[in-house]
Image (tube, grey):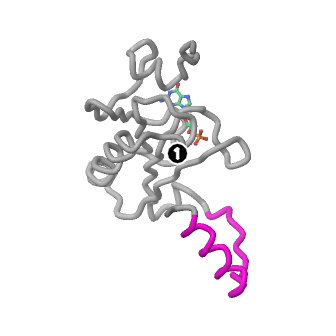
Amino acid sequence: MSEPEPSIFTLIIRGEIPCHKVYEDEHVFAFLDINPFSPGHTLVVPKEQAITLDALSDESSAAIGRVLPRISQAVLAVSGTVDFNVLQNNGEAAFQSVSHVHFHIIPKSEDGSGLAWPFKSTQLDPDEGARMAEQIRNYLE
Ligand code: DGP
């Protein structure tokens, strides 16, 4: 099978497009978002070019999980914030614009910069909830 076209993040990881890098290890690369929601807004990206999180290997997932808290601590310390969101979009309808898995670390400051709440919630129906949870448990077995 032929290699996929490199994503813009793969080009950044390879050093072919400049970025403000903040972290790199064998599996993970992190840099400042070019369109920050707030100062310090950072993207944490697996070097593996999976498009969405559900397609990411266990190895890359573990590597991301290992460093997300530590990179968050650094972003918070430097941006002088305490609150933050970790945002991870998958698919166009879910606001993903770059087809390469990435986690946003977005400081939320008291002056209001950062993410605003755009989501609409509903009430979980108990029967539907029981059915859905059982199906997911079965799938995971
Ligand atoms: P998402 O909507 O979750 O796919 O977010 C993609 C983010 O990637 C968006 O916040 C802007 C950022 N981005 C896109 N292209 C570049 C780039 O070339 N450099 C940097 N630093 N960030 C980029």
From this viewpoint, which residue is outermost toward the bottom?
126
Check the image and report above or below for 85 versus 45. Answer: below
Front-lying residue, 28 or 62: 62
Answer left or right for 43 relative to 72: right
Q: Residue 103's spot in the image, x, y percent?
A: 47, 45
Answer left or right for 121 relative to 33: right
Q: Which residues are magenta?
A: 117-138
Q: Which residue is mark 1?
A: 53
Instruction: Please tell me in which quarter of the rendered image ligand 1 is found.
Output: top right
Mark 1 residue type = Leu
Q: Residue 54's spot in the image, x, y percent?
A: 54, 47
Front-lying residue, 136 or 105: 136
Q: Quadrant of residue 130?
A: bottom right
Q: Residue at x 53, y 41 (%)?
A: 55
Q: Residue at x 37, y 28 (%)?
A: 20
Q: Residue at x 59, y 67 (%)?
A: 136
Q: Residues within 10 Å of mark 1 (few under 14, many from 20)?
A: some
Tally the numbered discs. 1
Residue 122 belongs to the span the image colors magenta: yes
Q: Residue 77's spot in the image, x, y percent?
A: 26, 53
Residue 43 belongs to the span the image colors magenta: no
Beta carbon of the mark 1 residue lies under 8 A of ligand 1: no
